[in-house]
Amino acid sequence: MSSEIPVCSDDEILLEHAGYRARVLHDAEDAIFVGRILGIRDIVSFHAASLSELKVAFEEAVDDYRETCARIGKVPETDASIGQASEAAGRALA
């Protein structure tokens, strides 16, 4: 991932790391960035007080998710694995 944080709008930031993407919103009231990994069924969120901390928090969330999956014997999901499972389910119903 580049060192720049891609801002998609005034209120939304998209991040990418190790094949995972996250959507980040800024909570102005609490002065914090709150993000969630996209494209997986598990809820993996992270937060940071500054943009410089945001990238690190996201990368740690991805790494923790993958480590937790390995520890419990679960294959970590990605955007691609969810899409493949949905396509397979659709073919099975057809």
Image: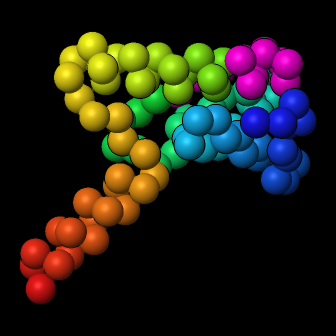
State the residue at coordinates (84%, 44%). 6
- Outermost residue to the bottom: 94
- Count of numbered badges drawn on the protein: 0
State which quadrant residue 80 falls in: bottom left
The front one of 83 and 12 is 83
Asked whether residue 28 is drawn in magenta, I would say no
Give the quarter of the figure containing the N terminus: top right
| Colouring rule applied to residues | rainbow
State which quadrant residue 92 falls in: bottom left
The answer to whether residue 75 is left or right of residue 13 is: left
Q: Which residues are magenta?
A: 45-56
State which quadrant residue 84 falls in: bottom left
The front one of 6 and 3 is 3
Camera sees residue 70: yes
Give the quarter of the figure containing the C terminus: bottom left
Camera sees residue 30: no
State the residue at coordinates (30%, 20%). 70
**Horizontal and vertical percent position of residue 52:** 85, 19
56 lies above or below 78: above
State the residue at coordinates (17%, 78%). 91
The front one of 34 and 85 is 85
82 lies above or below 25: below
Asked whether residue 46 is drawn in magenta, I would say yes
